Image: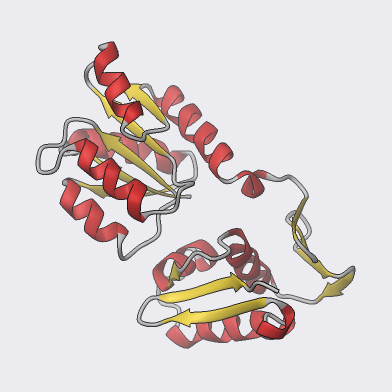
């Protein structure tokens, strides 16, 4: 998962990112609220860890912006050096899903992050089958069936198709897709992604007459939409 971390303290940012990376996540560190909000308008994140004592923008304002402009399911955990009831209530009332008190303990950080991700994205934690209408993905075998008929896909095509369905209606940036599907292949030719998207659209018949539209988002990436019938 792609997790954004906001903390003015460099050592704390590095510690949190180290723990998140060891748990298999991708960490994007930010030192100011304005920097984070600007980046969140360009990139997709699956979770936000927010230090409650940032100074350039109040944490309440950061959370308000996130709740007004980002997907409703986006989980937010705030981290505070204060353990008073008023501080904790302030964070939760402002829209956070959970909190951590400094000094951050590694085990607790991972446990709370995983718990919030499970709640926010339940289909991404399914063991075997993940179903979206007539589309059934078998995560362990990499097999996809549509209306009970098997669709032959390469490994990357399967991952790409599942990524779009898991984010149905949500625009995904090219950087997000690249990181989620191709991982460390940062030198991937730009046309490779477009070719894979075209193949997924064709093989899964993601066309308006079938109730779906897989379309480019200008100067950003792609979005899979389910059309009303």
Numbered-mark total: 0
Is 97 rendered above or below residue 4? Answer: above
Is 78 rendered above or below residue 68? Answer: above
Q: Residue at x 38, y 76 (%)?
A: 220
Q: Position of residue 5 (x, y in %)?
A: 30, 43
Is 92 rendered above or below residue 134? Answer: above
Q: Position of residue 106 (x, y in %)?
A: 40, 26
Q: Which quadrant would residue 69 be assigned to in this image?
A: bottom left
Q: Position of residue 190 (x, y in %)?
A: 43, 84
Is 75 rendered above or below residue 135? Answer: above
Q: Residue at x 46, y 64 (%)?
A: 179
Q: Position of residue 200 (x, y in %)?
A: 66, 79
Is 139 displayed left or right of 189 in the figure?
A: right
Q: Nearer the viewer, residue 79 or 157?
A: 79
Q: Nearer the viewer, residue 225 or 187?
A: 225
Check the image and name the residue furthest to the front: 229
Is 169 displayed left or right of 81 in the figure?
A: right
Is 212 displayed left or right of 13 in the figure?
A: right
Q: Residue at x 36, y 26 (%)?
A: 99
């Amino acid at each position: 998962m792609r997790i954004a971390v906001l903390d003015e303290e460099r050592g704390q940012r590095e510690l949190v990112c180290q723990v998140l990376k060891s748990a298999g996540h991708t960490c994007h560190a930010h030192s100011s609220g304005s920097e984070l909000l600007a980046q969140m308008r360009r990139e997709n994140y699956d979770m936000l860890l927010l230090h409650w004592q940032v100074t350039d923008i109040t944490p309440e304002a950061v959370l308000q912006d996130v709740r007004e402009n980002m997907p409703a399911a986006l989980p937010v955990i705030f981290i505070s050096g204060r353990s008073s009831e008023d501080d904790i209530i302030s964070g939760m009332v402002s829209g956070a899903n959970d909190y951590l008190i400094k000094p951050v303990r590694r085990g607790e950080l991972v446990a709370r992050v995983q718990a919030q991700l499970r709640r926010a994205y339940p289909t991404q934690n399914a063991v075997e089958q993940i179903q979206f209408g007539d589309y059934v993905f078998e995560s362990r075998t990499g097999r996809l069936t549509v209306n009970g008929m098997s669709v032959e896909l390469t490994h990357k095509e399967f991952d790409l198709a599942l990524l779009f369905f898991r984010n149905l209606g949500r625009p995904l940036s090219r950087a997000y897709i690249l990181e989620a599907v191709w991982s460390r292949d940062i030198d991937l030719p730009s046309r490779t992604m477009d070719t894979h998207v075209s193949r997924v659209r064709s093989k899964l018949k993601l066309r308006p007459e079938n109730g779906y539209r897989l379309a480019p988002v200008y100067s950003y990436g792609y979005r899979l939409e389910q059309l009303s019938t």
